[in-house]
Every structure is written in C-alpha cells, then in structure tokens.
Amino acid sequence: MRNIHALIIFTICCSLGFTAVGCKKFKVGKKNVESIDGLDGVVIDDLDAFPLDDRIDIDGVSEGESSFDTVYFGYDSAQIQPSERSKIESVAEHLNQNRSGGIAVEGHSDERGSREYNLALGERRALAVRAYLIGLGVDGSRIQTKSMGEEDPVSFGHDEESWGANRRSEFVILY
Amino acid sequence: MKRSLYLFSLIGVLVGSHGSAHAQVKVVKAVADKVSIDLSGVKTSAGSGEVFRKTLASDLVRSGWFSKAKKGKGTVTLLGTAENRGGALRAEVRVYGSRSQELFLSQVYKGEGTKARLLAHKAADDIVKAIKGVKGIASTHIIMVGTRTQKKELYVCDADGHHLIQLTKDRSVSVKPRWGPKGQKVTYTSYLKGYPDIYLVDIPSGSRTRLSSEPGLNSGAAISPNGKEVALVLSKDGNPELYIKHLASKRLTRITRTKRAAEASPSWSPEGQKMVYVSDQSGKPQLYVVSRNRGRPQRLTSRGVENVAPDWGKKGWIAYACRVGGRYQICIINPNTREIKQITQGNVDFEDPSWAPDGRHIVCSRTEHYRSSVYILDTLGDSPIRLFSHVGDWFSPAWSPN
C-alpha cells in the first residue's frame, strides 16, 4: 500500500515537472523528507490520491492526549506551512517506530464563517496532514481524519491571536 | 450617511468584481401591501379562548399579509367566538369583506383547551389562504441548534417562537439540521459516536438512524424533493466532495471532482434536478450549481466576496449568506437572471438562511457581540423579528416545509 502511495507521489511529481527535486532518488520512509519538501503543495493539493481507509472506532476506544505539537494553518488555507513540517515529521517518526496503533488527525478552523464550510475546511487540514504523513511512509490505514470545524476551539477570544490558535490540526493517539 | 457609504461599497464588490451586467444588487425596502383586518369582533372567554384570539391576531400580523385595523376600519372583518367549556375549546371564525359583505371563510375549530395555540395557527393559515390565496406559515416549525445546556443540541419550536422543545440530549455537537420534503424527517451532523456522522430523525416517532458514517467527514445532508435521495458531503475518497446517496439502495454517486477544493452545504432545486452548493475552488467559498446528472458545475456567485450556506426556495430564489464589508448579510439570488437582493443590513452578522414555505420569509441566525439568536426576515420589507429570547446561543435554523 505504501509503495502505491509513493508511486502516486512519484507520478505526480514527475508529471508536474519536479524532476529536479528528488524525483529520481525518491524513497519511501522518513528519509524522503527532502523530496517531500521539494513537492511543496503538490501532495497536499492532490488529496484524492489517498482515499480514506476503514475507520478506527473511537467510540469507547481509549484516546491518549498526545504530546505531539499542534500544526497551525493560515486563514482559509489547508496548506502545510514550512514552519509546521517538522511537527508532522516527528509524528511520522513515532508511527514508523511503533508499528501498532493508529492516530487521529483532528482538523479545526477558527470561528469565522459558515459552520458547514468550516467542517470541510477542517477536514482538508486533517487530510493534508495525513497526506504528508503517508508521504513520510506511514501506512494510511493507521491515520484517521476527524474534522471539528469551528466547534471545538482552544482559544476563546475573538481576535487574530485566538483565530490563529484555533486554525489547527491536533494528533490523538489511538491504542 | 453611513448607510449610503455602506451600500456603495456593497455594490462595488458584488457588481464591479463580477465584471458583467448580470449581478444587480437591490436592497429591499418596500413593505408589501397589507390587508387591514378588524379583529375587534371576536368574542372570547377567559383562558384558552383568550389564548386562541391573541395567538390568531399575532399570527395574522406575522404572516406579513395583514395589518390590524381599528374597530370598524378594516378592509376585512373577522367575527366569531372562542370559548372553553370543560377543558375543550370551540372557536368559530367568519371572515367578511367589510364593504362587500362577501364571506371569505367560515370555519369551526375544536380541540382540547391546551391546543389553543395550535388551533389558532390553523385558523390563521386558513384566513391567509382565503384572503391572499397563498400558503400561511403559522402552523410550521423551526428547528435549530441551541446551547442552553452548554452543549449543542437540536431544538424545535413553532414559527412564532413558542412551544420550544429540546429534541436531542446527546451531550455532543449537533450541526446544521435540515428538514426533509414532507416536514417529518430531519437530517443533521452529530459527533455522537466520536466522528462527524449524518443522522436522520423521524420527528413524529422520535426514532433516529445513522444515515452515513463513512471514514472522514459526513456532513451537509439534504433530502431530495422526492424523498428518495440525500445530497451530502463526504471525504472518504480523500477530499471533501459532493455525493448523492440513494436511500433505498444506499448507492453513492459522486457529483464533484475538485482535488484542490472543499465542497459544503448542498441544497436541492424545487424540482430536484439541480443542486446549489459551496465550493472554494476559486480560493474563496462561492456558490455553484450542478445538475443531479453530473453536468459541469456552473459558478453562480461573484468573485471577491464569500458566499455560503445556500438554501434554494420553492419560488426559485436561492437565499445565502454573503460576506460584504467584513460582515455576513442575507442575500437572495435568482439563478436564472442572477438578480441579487440584499435582505439584511447593519454591523452584525446574519448567517444560515432558510426559506419559509411561503417563499417570502426567511429564518436565519443573527450574531452581535458574539452572541447568536434566531431572526425571521421578510423579503418584502417588514422588519426582522427575533424568534424568541431564551437564554443561550441559537443558530443554524431551518424552516419546516409545512
């Protein structure tokens, strides 16, 4: 399954002319970080390449508050910003070292705008993180996405500081 | 002065950026012609009889088609009695043309005294139908999300804001309820089982089933006018996209293919051949129309502003929330002519519009200083009315089809 994903990224990357950046030396696993960096935006934009696997039932499953750093996003954007990549890379490292269990990526938005649109935006943020993890060699079946839209803020102010804190993806370990 | 500046900027955004002659924004001001009705001739007894009379009078004004006349001055005259005997209410209502003496309606309403409001709603709708020939809204319901218990639960009330009932006690998050075409079923998104799933509630029986629980996002469910299908947004294929689910066979048909965009909030055209929905494929959320047979989606709303939460009304106009001047306002657009009318104004946010079955009124949320309440708007110009003033935030209302 991972190889298929890698092949898809490889194909996308070649077809879009990213040959100069790591296409030939593309490898599955955490060593391909440089290659992913070179594919800025491509993996994220083609979320279709990674259909979701069956759900990991989280109803009654113990959820561990993970110590992984929260990934932040720009306004109305699901792009992984360069400053956020190392956070996802450390999650990939953890998942690749611990072969059991999975992770839920929660996508959130700020309070502004349509609640339903914000659900879709939050999902795209979670899916973008998932795509990045898959690119780093994590098996997609271990990564669930869950959008909370604007329904579960961590900061309750009504200014840019709070909005920025709420536009985020969080990681929840599923045992 | 402030208002005129504001209007100028609005027209600049909506017309100027569209770059075509289609979009013309009209701000609704004219109040519809009203029939003056003399209600002074209704004889009531205390208790449920008086509740009936007061509710009927209020309903007729809220219908938008009537104004209360002084005794002997109305164009039409309402005569009758409303009396309670032994817990039962019997109301007799006759409506005449004041000059012509033409009898428009003569009807008896009987029931338990506790049902006085319900009977009055029925009488009001009968009078609207008899005088104006249109469907009334007094007997309809409004469903919404409320935070009275600190959690986001579904509530339903009468169209006049009375008789508020808490429908769910999930202690979870409920999102954006919508009525089915017959007004008996409601779909909404809930995190009851941890993930955002779509649930279907049968209001008369109170039974609830999970309609969609695909991996990822399940949201935006809207039952088709024929009741056989549901439009919904799923991310199971790796990105939020619009789908149609056939309810009997459970078969899914994918409608959109936008790898770089999110879709949300579908609403069916009255005949069920098309859907309007939100997509951010242009970079900002805008409205698009697509045929149910998967034709090429057509962009409906202009570039440069955000347009969300569409609701396609029975008369063909689509109500939606448009972001102008940093605020959300309720607008309606004719999808054929692309004529736009802005219904709300002011330094507050109006969102999540839903058409009343009369095709005239709209229910929506109004947020000021971060507190939300539900308001009823009139597209013919009557002032907005607050639905009720219960404690808590109230939003995402939907008006029942009957």
Image (cartoon, coloured by chain):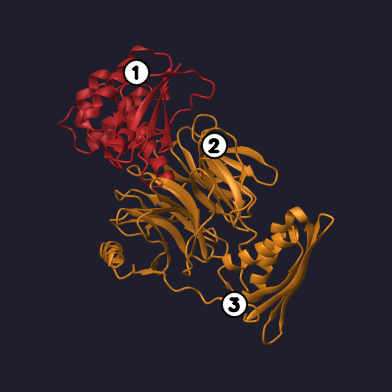
Comes first in the chain, label 3 or label 2: 3
Asked which quadrant contains residue B297, the reply is bottom left
Q: How far apart are marks 2 and 1 (CA)?
A: 31 Å
Residue B238 got which mark?
A: none
Q: Residues within 10 Å of mark 2 (few under 14, many from 20)?
A: few
Same-subunit check for callouts 3 and 1: no
Dots 2 and 1: beta carbons under 8 Å?
no
- Chain ID of residue with mark 2: B
Answer with left or right where residue B287 lies relative to residue B89.
left
What residue sits right under mark 2 in the picture? B149
- Classify mark 1: helix, strand or loop: loop
Count up the numbered dots: 3
Q: In the image, which is nearer the foreground, mark 2 or mark 1?
A: 2
Q: Is residue B136 visible?
A: no
What residue sits right under mark 3 in the picture? B36
Asked which quadrant contains residue B347, the reply is bottom left
Note the chain letter of the red one.
A
Q: Work out which residue is located at the far left of the displayed protein and give it.
A: A20
What residue sits right under mark 1 in the picture? A67
Dots 3 and 2: beta carbons under 8 Å?
no
| Spot occupied by residue B33 in the image (x, y as percentages of width and height) | 52, 77
Give, as a three-letter code, the residue at label 2.
Thr
Give, as a three-letter code, the residue at label 3.
Ser
- Classify mark 3: helix, strand or loop: strand
- Chain ID of residue with mark 3: B
| Spot occupied by residue A132 in the image (x, y as percentages of width and height) | 30, 28
